[in-house]
Image (cartoon, rainbow, N blue to C red):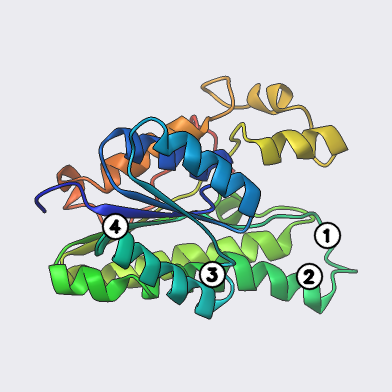
Amino acid sequence: MSGAPVVVVTGGASGIGLGISKLFAANGHPVAMLDLQEEAIEREGEALRATGATVLSLRVDIAKRDEIDSAYAAVRRELGPIGCVIANAGISSTDDFLTMTPESWQRMIDVNLTGTFHSIQAALPDMVEQKWGRIVTISSQAAQSGAPDRAHYAASKGGVIGLTRSLARELARHGITVNTIPPSLVDTPLAREGERTGQVPPLEVIAQHIPIARPGTPADIAAACAFLCSDGASYITGQEINVNGGSWM
């Protein structure tokens, strides 16, 4: 594809999503940053625009299709047709399965899985018309190994992996690749908050069990996304790209 395609990053206001937005913007892509955190998305979007980047920042609840459709209409109007989607937005919580409420379960599925569905499907007409597209979902190692007290989270992210594989097969004929990155430990504000509240051990302690003995960073995930969205990755689709420092299970 000639020129730098428009990139949509969901959950773009912080953590992994912000790292992805920064790298694509630095690489010359017009970037649409979508996030539920209105103040944060405006602040981070303005900071990137101040560097000369072409960035549109929008407050969106990805679990609501009407909000996704409205946001994507704004992206097309302001930036042009969508070429890449990084479906990163998601939520996480700890919840004993024995006492987990149906509402807690459903909210996790609505955001992490159905929100990914909305974020991808709404962009596909542009990609099909261009006969080119790149989709990267951000799943989780929890879906590969299981996660005590986070069954709803692991199940939602397992659904994202299954969705990714299915779409890779279905959309290949349109020149669209679909891959997923299931991170393990990543040093983000959300992870540090879990550390602070005692939901997870100190990140540096967890990192001792990773062959590359450090937590991952948003930049690590962003670099893999940039490659998967490049022409050099045109023969890679339906894959789990394990950016995890060598950790497993």
Instruction: Please give the residue where the numbered disc 2 appears in the rendered image.
Output: 104
Q: Earlier in the sequence, mark 4 or mark 3?
A: 4
Q: Are marks 1 and 2 in contact (CB under 8 Å)?
A: yes
Residue depicted at x 63% and y 71%: 109
First in sequence, mark 3 or 1: give its number.
1
Query: 123 or 198, which lies in front?
Result: 123
Residues at marks 3 and 1 touching, judged by CB atoms closer than 8 Å: no
The amino acid type found where label 3 is placed reads Gly
> Callout 2: 10 Å neighbours few (<14), some, many (20+)?
few
Q: Are marks 4 and 2 in contact (CB under 8 Å)?
A: no
How far apart marks 1 and 4 lie (CA) works out to 40 Å
Q: Which label belongs to residue 79?
A: 4
Q: Is residue 189 left or right of residue 162?
A: right
Q: Quarter of the image holding residue 130?
A: bottom left
Q: Earlier in the sequence, mark 1 or mark 4?
A: 4
Question: Vertical placement of 128 versus 23: above or below?
Answer: below
Q: Residue at x 77, y 37 (%)?
A: 193
Q: Which residue is mark 1?
A: 95
Mark 2 secondary-structure assignment = helix
Disc nearest the viewer among 1 and 2: 2
- Label 4 element class: loop
* Left or right relative to 118: residue 241: left
- Which residue corresponds to the image point at 21% horizontal and 45% vertical from the top-left? 230
Q: Provide the residue designation for mark 3.
A: 115
Q: CA distance from mark 4 to mark 2?
A: 36 Å
Q: Nearer the viewer, residue 128 or 55?
A: 55
